[in-house]
Every structure is written in structure tokens, then in C-alpha cells.
Image (cartoon, rainbow, N blue to C red):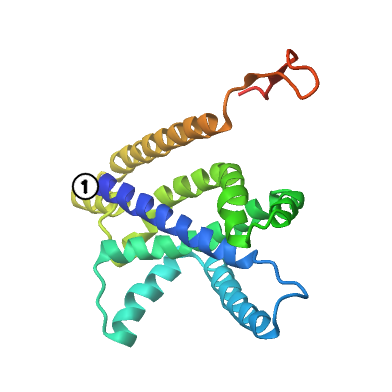
Amino acid sequence: MGARNTLIISLSGTIIGFLIGILIGIIRTIPIDHNTSMPAKIVYQIVNFFLLCYIEVFRGTPMIVQAMVVFYGAAMLYNVHLSPIPAGIFIVSINTGAYMAEIVRGGILSVDKGQFEAAHSIGMTHAQTMASIVLPQALRSILPATSNEFVINIKDTSVLSVISVTELFFLSKSVAGINYRYFEVFLITCIIYFIMTFTVTRILRYLEVRLEGPSVFTIHGSQTVPEAEFRIVGRDR
């Protein structure tokens, strides 16, 4: 049950955090130029300021502290008593979202500016450019970083034991305390964590390779010489 809860929390938190990161990354890369109205500039600057505060706070504080503040703060300030597992998913999600926001922003900025200009020159809006041209390229380039965040979340769910989330570390600690077999129990726990992270890493690496396309492919024909043939060799995998 502990391993199952660890996977549920880490997977849910990574997916939700990924969606948060995409939304914030897109907002923070909206172009502001001389054609933008002053009210729109002011609104954008205010929104961007709060998003930047969110990113800096959640990237600059440990998840274990965030868990304590959210779980016990909600009960003390708002009289809201959260269930441990939903609270754990929420904490992992907002923490991951802060990291993914900067990862997505970097992926968007890595796309050549000429593609933005070409899209705008044919009348595409910023939203259309993002959806059809920029995001597909950016998401493929940030997949390794996203995979790394998923692996980190699997391991970092162990800190949620401070709010009584019944994940793998929490149950291992309970079993070790009952049987007084700390070394054996936590050795097995290490092995389980390694199996989960290794399996996830291999699966996501396979997806990365599939998205990259074939390492060797051939382009037939050209505008001037129809029978021309170009053989393109990609990097080694």
C-alpha cells in the first residue's frame, strides 16, 4: 500500500504540476511590445509579479516545510482539515508547478525567434503560434527535465510522512519501529525505491526516443532535382 500511495501521489503531483507549469510558462512568455496598451501592460506586470513570487517561494523553501505550513496552516487559519493523501498530492503539485514553470519557460525561449516571426507574418495569433508551432517543440525538448521531476517526486514523497501520509517511507518506519529491524526494513525500502525510479526512468527514456523519431531517415526528391535523395543520420542513441 505504501508503494502504491507513493506512485499515486508522485504521478498525480507531476501531471498537475506539469499543467501548472505549462500555464505559467505560457503566461510569462507573452510578448509585450509598443503595440500593447498600457492597461494590458499593467495587468501583465501585476500577474507576472505574483507568478514570480510563487515560483521563488516554492523553489526556495523545502517541501517538508511547505507540507507543514499547508497541512497545519489550513486547519489553524481556515479550520479546513485536509486528508493526508489529497494534501500530499496538492503539496507535490504546487511544488512541482514552480519548477516546471521555469522549465517550460526555458523550453519556449529555446525555440528560434524566427519561427515566432514567421507565424505572425502569416497572420497567426500568439495563441495559435504557441499551440501549433512552439509548444510541440518546447514540450519535446523539456521531456528529459520532466522525467527527472517525476523521479524526484517519487523520492521526495518520503517527506510527507510528517503529515501522516501513508506512503512507502511512513509505513517502513512504522514496521521498523514495531519489529526493531531498522536495517533490514530500510534496505528493502531502498530496493523498492530503486525499482520504482529505475522502471520509470526506462519507460520515460523510451518515450523520449520515440518522440525523437528515427535516427536515420531519407528525404526523397527536391525542388530542382526530383530524383535527388538525401540520407540524414541523426545522433547516436
Amino acid carrying label 1: it is: Met
Which residue of the protein is positioned furthest toward the right in this rendering?
224
* Residue at image location 29% in from the left, 49% down from the top: 168
Q: Camera-side residue: 98 or 2? A: 98
Q: Is residue 66 above or below residue 211?
A: below
Which residue of the protein is positioned furthest toward the top in this rendering?
227
Q: Is residue 233 above or below residue 77?
A: above
Question: In the rendered image, which quarter contains the C terminus?
Answer: top right
Q: Position of residue 231 (x, y in %)?
A: 71, 16
Q: Position of residue 157 (x, y in %)?
A: 38, 55
| Horizontal arrangement in the rendering, residue 27 relative to residue 86 (left or right) | right
* Residue at image location 57% in from the left, 49% down from the top: 132
Local packing at callout 1 (Cα closer than 10 Å; few below 14, some 14-19, many 20+) is few
Q: Regarding mark 1 in the picture, which secondary structure is present there?
A: loop
Give the total of numbered labels. 1
* Residue at image location 33% in from the left, 42% down from the top: 189
| Horizontal arrangement in the rendering, residue 149 relative to residue 195 (left or right) | right
Whether residue 224 is visible, yes or no, is yes
Q: Camera-side residue: 40 or 2? A: 40
Residue assigned mark 1:
1
Whether residue 164 is visible, yes or no, is no
Q: Is residue 90 above or below residue 201?
A: below
Q: Camera-side residue: 220 or 7? A: 220
Q: Position of residue 190 (x, y in %)?
A: 37, 40
Quadrant in the rendering for residue 31: bottom right
Q: Position of residue 26 (x, y in %)?
A: 58, 62
